[in-house]
Amino acid sequence: MALAAFTLIQSAAKNLRLNLNSIFQQTCDLASQLSNLRAIYAVSEIENHVVDGNERLEIGCEGISLEFE
């Protein structure tokens, strides 16, 4: 009977270890995803340093115009 109890405890400990390992891996992956998301939103905070041009698009003309300085 003691051998059966030991086997049961060993199996439970192994399952606990595997579950904890899985949780830690998922947590690390979640932290990485949150870090990537934070970096994406940080890009939206960058100030626009491009000066708007002063040429207007003619009415009836298709496309866009670009001005480089």
Image: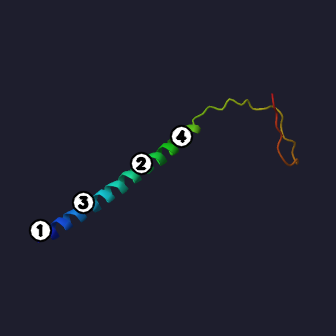
Closer to the camera, 40 or 65?
40
Q: Secondary structure at mark 3?
A: helix
Q: What's the mark number on residue 2?
A: 1
Residue with the mark numbered 2:
28
The residue mark sitting in front, 1 or 4, is 1
Locate residue 47: give its quadrant. Answer: top right
Q: Amino acid at mark 4?
A: Ala
Cβ atoms under marks 1 and 4 closer than 8 Å: no
Query: What's the CA distance linking mark 4 and mark 3?
Result: 39 Å
Q: What's the mark number on residue 13?
A: 3
State the image coordinates of residue 49 (x, y, percent, origin top left).
68, 29
Residue with the mark numbered 4:
39
Q: What's the mark number on residue 11?
A: none
The residue mark sitting in front, 1 or 3, is 1
**Residue located 16% across and 70% down the image:** 4
State the image coordinates of residue 63 (x, y, percent, origin top left).
84, 47
Which residue is most to the top? 69
Query: 18 left or right of 62?
Result: left
Q: Secondary structure at mark 1?
A: helix
**Residue located 52% across and 44% down the image:** 36
Cβ atoms under marks 2 and 4 closer than 8 Å: no
Q: Which is more N-terminal, label 3 or label 4? A: 3
